[in-house]
Amino acid sequence: MNRRSFLRTAAATAFSWNSFSQGAKRPNILFFIADDWGFQHAGVYGCTWVKTPNIDRVAKEGVLFKNCFTSNPKCSPCRATILTGRNSWQMKEAINHNSIFPNDFAVFPDLLEKGGYFVGMTGKGWGPGDYKSTGWTRNPAGPEYQARTLKPPYNGISNRDYAGNFDDFLAKRPGGQPFCFWFGTQEPHRFYEEGSGVRVGRKPAEVTVPGYLPDNRAVRSDLLDYALEVEWNDLHLGRALASLEKAGELDNTLIFVTSDHGMPFPRVKGQIYEDGFHIPLMVRWGSQMKGGRVVEDFINTRDFAPTILEAAGVAAAPTITGKSFVNVLKSGKSGIVDASRDMMIVAKERHDIGRPNDGGYPVRAIRTREFLYVRNYEPDRWPAGNPETGYRNVDDSPSKTNIISSFDKFYQLSFGKRAPEELFDIQKDPECLNNLAKKPEFAITKRKLRERMEETLRGEGDPRMLGRADFFETIEYVGPRKHSYEEWLKHRQP
């Protein structure tokens, strides 16, 4: 059953408004998703140099998840998995960044709308890419509320008043109707105002520099600029929480706070290492669940849609392959709640142009509690894009410029060619700096992880595991051919 067929029957298969439960009020949904926010950069994750009081509030009044992952660490592939409840390799053309969004799969905002919800979005929904040519009449994240702007703009790029647009949405909501709002900020996506963190008085010495980046003033300053962007998100989240409180809806709103992938720095965004695909997640649901908990279960972005739908009392589409974690939210427990949630598989094909014939850098990886095993299928290719085209799978930044000019170990970590197989002890080496794949004592571990990964992927229909990897080379790139500042402004998600 495709998306259109399912939506025609959704009203009949979903719980009706009156039958949700005996007089119970259906929860609102606020889905807050940042753009390029790394999982460790919030106060509740122990970060001291990024100030996030509102994000921390959601976590402390709800559940903080320590192990949430995206199956593809790039904007549009991750957002496709969130909307459809499917893994990246199950998304046809949408596995690639800046491609088309096929009209084969139902998305949770449409299902909620059919089930009686008032839906909307602001900022960045699904994208970048093309959804119109496949028959979508609006962004798959929902009807857009984009009218309000801030003057002057905060950072020279995004002057959109996300929280103000949310207020416009609430003002138009029919009385008593439950709502779902996709709150998609464009921060901390680049570009930044270089040196803005230092100019407002932040100290470079405050920053914690990961081991894969050089510890120098340029990188520290760049990280402070990033911190300001994360804090801008936090400010808008705080305004949204205040609006919900004023409307008397806060405790009847299921709030997700998350990101699509790691920060826009070399070796992170778009790369299959821990900081690239490990994302933040905190969930608040008022009196419907016990707050103040920290959960270590593995959560996949494809689990978001079935969780939201179950909480709303709306039937999940048959195309959804994720698993609801409402049981985890309502368990009242901390630590490991559902022991079966102990593994994550991550993938990429082509993220951006920058190689002959726009070829990708295909990868599959499996993450368990102890290890990350990575299989690079084209190790002779450059993993971050070719040198002569400027390593286009890494956003331009002071950090990137600094590393490219060095040709030292940091260059190799971020831009150099990689081994066919990589294995990291996540407990001892969370930054993935020490490849254990060639060590004899890890040979059995490596084999078992590879076998488990490939068996799972075959069961989920990954074309690469089924002898149809050539399909990925046929997917059209629909984005801008350049990634300069001017081109990004021209083609960025509206």
Image: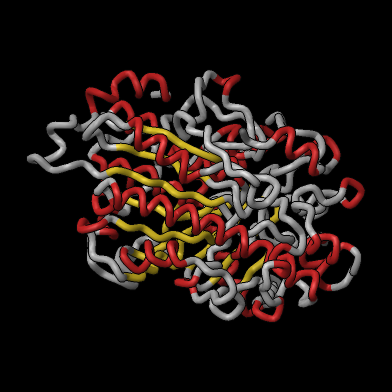
Across and down, in percent, residue 48 comes to 55, 77
Across and down, in percent, residue 160 comes to 57, 41
Give the colour scheme of this rendering: secondary structure
Residue 436 appears in the figure: no
Outermost front residue: 151
Residue at x 44%, y 68% (from the top left corner): 66
Residue at x 46%, y 46% (from the top left corner): 163
Please name whichever residue, 244 or 258, is drawn nearer the observer in this view of the structure.
244
Across and down, in percent, residue 216 comes to 79, 76
Please name whichever residue, 156 or 191, is drawn nearer the observer in this view of the structure.
156
Is 122 placed above or below 134 here? below
Instruction: Kindly indicate the quadrant of the structure image that contains residue 134.
Output: top right
- Give the number of callouts: 0
Is 153 placed above or below 105 here? below
Task: Determine whether, in the image, residue 331 is placed left or right of residue 453.
Answer: left
Is 62 placed above or below 121 here? below
Please name whichever residue, 279 or 461, is drawn nearer the observer in this view of the structure.
279
Residue at x 53%, y 32% (from the top left corner): 147
Residue at x 24%, y 33% (from the top left corner): 177
For the C terminus, which image quadrant? top right
Residue 1 appears in the figure: yes
Outermost left residue: 22
For the N terminus, which image quadrant? top left
Across and down, in percent, residue 311 comes to 26, 45
